[in-house]
Image: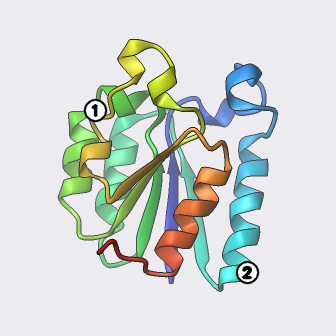
Amino acid sequence: MKILVINGPNMNLLGKRERELYGTKSLADLEDAIFEEAKNLGVNVEFFQTNYEGAIIEKIQQAEGVFDGIILNPAGYTHTSVAIRDAISSISVPVIEVHITNIFSREDFRSRSITGGAARGVITGLGIYGYILALNFLAKNYTID
């Protein structure tokens, strides 16, 4: 099984930006935690971070037939990108959207996820543990009855 983890804009600044919201763990720390869990699950993971909307769209489109699942944190594009939502809708690969912070307890404009409506599920507000939950869900092929 192969899982793609996509992190959007400003996620490269984890551990440096707004520590009161995002904590002190860096993107490398996040990737290490995911990699360790993936190793325990016998799953291969690939990481991708970009600050560009088009790059996220291309990576999602290229996942078809290559990956068994996607963990996606579209970051600021969560609230604005119909194009990323359309890319998610255009593939059969299940996508779990993840947010480190609780988007519903933040500014009003962050309380709506345009992209989440096309995802298989959304995990928000559980810190980096949300990524671990998403990985376990995809790795164990859970279904919702």
- Specify the amino acid type for callout 2: Asn
Residue tagged 2: 40
Residue 110 in the image, given as x and y percentages of width and height: 41, 22
> Which residue is farthest front?
145
Residue tagged 1: 81
- Residue ID at (76%, 70%): 36
- Residue ID at (58%, 33%): 101
**How are the residues colored?**
rainbow
Front residue of 30/108: it is 108
Q: Residue 112's quadrant in the figure?
A: top left
Question: Does 72 appear above or below 102?
Answer: below
Estimate how packed mark 2 is, as few (under 14), some (14 to 19) or many (20 or more) residues with alpha carbons within 10 Å: few
- Specify the amino acid type for callout 1: Ser
Q: Is residue 123 left or right of residue 57?
A: right
- Residue ID at (29%, 75%): 145
Give SS at disc 1.
loop
Question: Does 109 appear above or below 39?
Answer: above
Residue 70 in the image, given as x and y percentages of width and height: 43, 63
Question: Does 112 appear above or below 86?
Answer: above
Q: Which mark is residue 92?
A: none
- Residue ID at (38%, 31%): 77
- Front label number (2 vs 1): 2
Assess whether mark 1 and mark 2 are in contact (beta carbons under 8 angstroms). no
Give SS at disc 2.
helix
Estimate how packed mark 1 is, as few (under 14), some (14 to 19) or many (20 or more) residues with alpha carbons within 10 Å: some
Task: Measure how far apart labels 2 and 1 are at the Cα level.
Answer: 34 Å
Residue 10 in the image, given as x and y percentages of width and height: 58, 29
Q: Is residue 10 left or right of residue 95?
A: right
Residue 134 in the image, given as x and y percentages of width and height: 52, 62
